[in-house]
């Protein structure tokens, strides 16, 4: 995988215990310098949370896709680690700074990474109430044509308390298993719970076109993906109700073997909507149809219009537009 090159400018906001809020964000170089000590709780104990977001640029305007939904999920993640969260105004102001501050006039899609982490540090976690919110961005934009997926039945993705939030510690064990999957020729991992029910892929939610229905694991033990929600809404707009329910791996395999599975796809902010073309379970490998079901292909096009052609897409999907931020690139004075 190509090494990510974060853009040189980040936006940073520090928490004030006196005012019990985060201060106005400011642009800074992408380096911590003396802002964080090695004893920070984020380094010692993993006290950090993050979001993955997208910004789409067209001429002098840009869309921060579903920024309110991402902020609400960040709030829940901060609460899970007993950390204060930035207000929505501070959250989006930092994103505006990095989108506009790193604008090169060419890039049309940015991946955004807002993070909140504990900068104080003692012998025990959170003895010092010091926190920082920062927003980074990159042009990360992989072109993926089908996913090869390893089913992981033995190792847990995360602990139940953190299953629905994006804490940094969630991704340590899953990253190691994903690396093992990549060594076996797979792209990602499909995690099962201890009873064999589908959860999600690493950084992606999973959908199946099963027995003439579109089904996906119900919320509760999985991350409530923003792209997952968008796909469900877009399918509903086309008259297809997604069934959110428990899906056992044996049901999925039986459908694969019996021809009742017409499609399997994953959704994420970073990678969009991608077909699963191979499922590896133990010693067995199952090849899937590379052609998407017609309705899924249509929804992928809806998603492209909604995001990359947002001035047009927003008129058709007002609810999504309301949950997003649209800004303007200010011309540079000469």
Image (cartoon, helix red, strand yellow):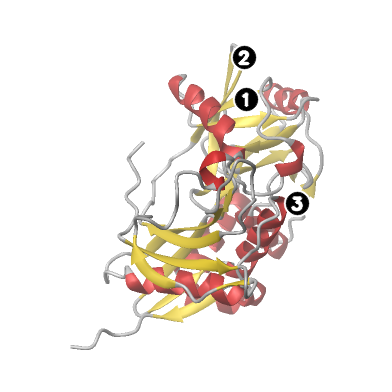
In this view, 152 is above or below 168: above
Mark 3 or mark 1, whichever is nearer to me = 1
Q: Position of residue 176 (x, y in %)?
A: 52, 27
Q: Position of residue 180 (x, y in %)?
A: 49, 22
Q: What residue is drawn where x is 47% and y is 71%? A: 94
First reached walking from the N terminus: tag 2 or tag 1: 1
Q: Is residue 313 visible?
A: no
Determine contact: label 2, label 1, CB under 8 Å. Answer: yes
Mark 3 crowdedness (10 Å alpha carbons): few <14, some 14-19, many ≥20: some
Which residue corresponds to mark 1?
151
Which residue corresponds to mark 2?
282
Q: Position of residue 35 (x, y in %)?
A: 42, 58
Q: What residue is drawn where x is 60% and y is 50%? A: 296
Q: Which mark is residue 242?
A: 3
Determine contact: label 2, label 3, CB under 8 Å. Answer: no
Q: Is residue 201 visible?
A: yes
Please identify the quadrant where the C terminus is shown: bottom left
């Amino acid at each position: 995988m190509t090494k990510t090159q974060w853009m040189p400018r980040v936006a940073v906001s520090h928490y004030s215990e006196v005012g019990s809020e985060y201060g106005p964000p400011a642009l800074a170089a992408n380096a911590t310098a003396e802002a964080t000590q090695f004893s920070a709780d984020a380094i010692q104990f993993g006290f950090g949370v993050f979001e993955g977001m997208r910004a789409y640029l067209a001429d002098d305007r840009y869309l921060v896709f579903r920024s309110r939904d991402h902020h609400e999920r960040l709030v829940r993640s901060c609460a899970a680690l007993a950390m204060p969260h930035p207000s929505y105004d501070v959250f989006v102001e930092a994103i505006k700074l990095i989108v506009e501050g790193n604008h090169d006039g060419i890039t049309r899609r940015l991946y955004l990474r807002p993070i909140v982490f504990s900068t104080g540090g003692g012998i025990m976690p959170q003895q010092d109430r010091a926190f920082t919110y920062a927003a980074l961005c990159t042009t990360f934009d992989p072109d993926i044509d089908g996913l090869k997926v390893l089913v992981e039945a033995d190792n847990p993705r995360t602990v139940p308390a953190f299953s629905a939030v994006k804490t940094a510690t969630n991704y340590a064990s899953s990253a190691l298993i994903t690396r093992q999957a990549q060594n076996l020729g797979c792209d990602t991992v499909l995690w099962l719970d201890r009873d064999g029910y589908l959860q999600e892929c690493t950084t992606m939610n999973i959908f199946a076109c099963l027995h003439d229905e579109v089904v996906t694991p119900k919320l509760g033990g999985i991350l409530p993906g923003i792209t997952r929600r968008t796909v469900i809404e877009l399918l509903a707009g086309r008259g297809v109700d997604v069934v959110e329910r428990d899906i056992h791996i044996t049901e999925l395999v039986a459908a694969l073997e019996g021809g009742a599975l017409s499609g399997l796809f994953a959704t994420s902010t970073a990678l969009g909507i991608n077909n699963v073309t191979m499922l590896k379970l133990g010693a067995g490998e199952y090849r899937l149809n590379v052609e998407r079901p017609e309705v899924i292909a249509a929804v992928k096009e809806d998603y492209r219009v909604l995001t990359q052609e947002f001035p047009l897409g927003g008129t058709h999907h007002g609810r999504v537009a309301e949950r997003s931020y649209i800004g303007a690139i200010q011309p540079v004075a000469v």
